[in-house]
Amino acid sequence: EGDGGRGGPNHEFALSIARKISGLRGVSVLAMDTDGTDGPTDAAGGLVDSYTLELLEKQGVDVEEYLRKHNSYEALKRGKALLITGPTRTNVNSIIIAVIT
């Protein structure tokens, strides 16, 4: 549902996984494109952890609504969870890394 939002597949994944790892201490997930841009944005992807959802909710961000409107870039931006690398001059693949400490 919805279109016209900002964000790419890795932004959507990062915002979605933030819901799943909420409250799990020591869990962080990075989802990014190696070329330095995900979708039509300036961000390679998103880096979320077990506190991202809580932070967004405290700011009044309705994560479900942002996902429904495919506006994950803006939600991650509000949560300071965007990964901005600039152009890397390589386009190998998407990368997803989970770290559990």
Image (tube, helix red, strand yellow):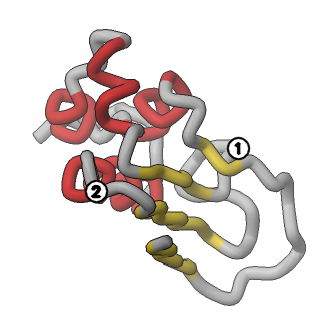
Of 21 and 62, which appears nearest the observer?
A: 21
Q: Which residue is mark 2?
A: 24
Q: Residue at x 35, y 60 (%)?
A: 13
Q: Which residue is mark 1?
A: 42
- Extreme bottom residue here? 92
Residue 83 x/y as whole percent: 67, 50
- Any mark on residue 82, and which? none
Amino acid type of disc 2? Leu
In the image: residue 64, left or right of residue 33: left
Label 1 neighbour load within 10 Å: few <14, some 14-19, many 20+: some
Amino acid type of disc 1? Asp
Which structural element holds mark 1? loop
Contact, mark 1 vs mark 2 (Cβ under 8 Å): no
Which corner quadrant of the image does residue 3 belong to?
A: top left
Residue 62 x/y as whole percent: 21, 22
Marks 1, 2: nearer the viewer = 2
Residue 57 x/y as whole percent: 27, 21
